[in-house]
Amino acid sequence: MSKGTNEYVDEEDGRPYQKPEVDVDAINDEIWLRKKEEEEQQQKEINMSIKVLTAKIKYNYDNLRGSFLEHHSSSWGNPESPTPLELEESIKSEVYSWLNDLGIDVEFRKESEDEL
């Protein structure tokens, strides 16, 4: 610092020292990268908590009763005797409705008889 001033002077060329400009873009990039890393870490933690359950559902029309029949029979071609596909769709609808209301994601896949 030169005598009598409040400025720092560069010893090599004698010019007053100037603070470097703040690189706002670099700061924003760094903030964005940190947020991205935090989001990726949170997603990893979420993914570790996801479990896949496979359920085998066996049913017999003669054993079905109550509100299930009342609710679904109107969508069947013959309310007294649904086709296997109509019955399967009704059961899927029921399972999806209950679990989805609980916030549980449901995906149905048709498995071959060999896999059962």
Image: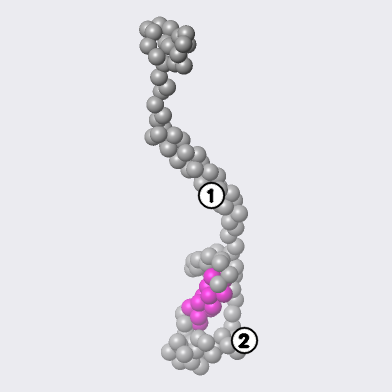
81 sits left or right of 23 in the view: right
Tell me, yes or no, if residue 27 can be seen here.
yes
Q: Which of these two is toward me, 30 or 47?
A: 30
Crowd band around label 2 with a 10 angstrom C-alpha radius: few (<14), some (14–19), many (20+): few
Residue at image position (59%, 83%) is 60
Q: Position of residue 46 (x, y in %)?
A: 57, 52
- Amino acid identity at mark 2: Asn
Q: Position of residue 114 (x, y in %)?
A: 54, 65
86 sits left or right of 48 in the view: left
Q: Which mark is residue 63?
A: 2
Q: Is residue 98 magenta?
A: yes
Q: Mark 1 points at which residue?
A: 43
Residue numbers of the magenta segment: 87-100
Picture layout, residue 108 above or below residue 82? above
**Residue at the outermost front position:** 4
Q: Position of residue 100 (x, y in %)?
A: 54, 70
Residue 75, quarter of picture: bottom left
Q: Do the residues labelled 1 and 2 touch (CB within 8 Å)?
A: no
- Amino acid identity at mark 1: Gln
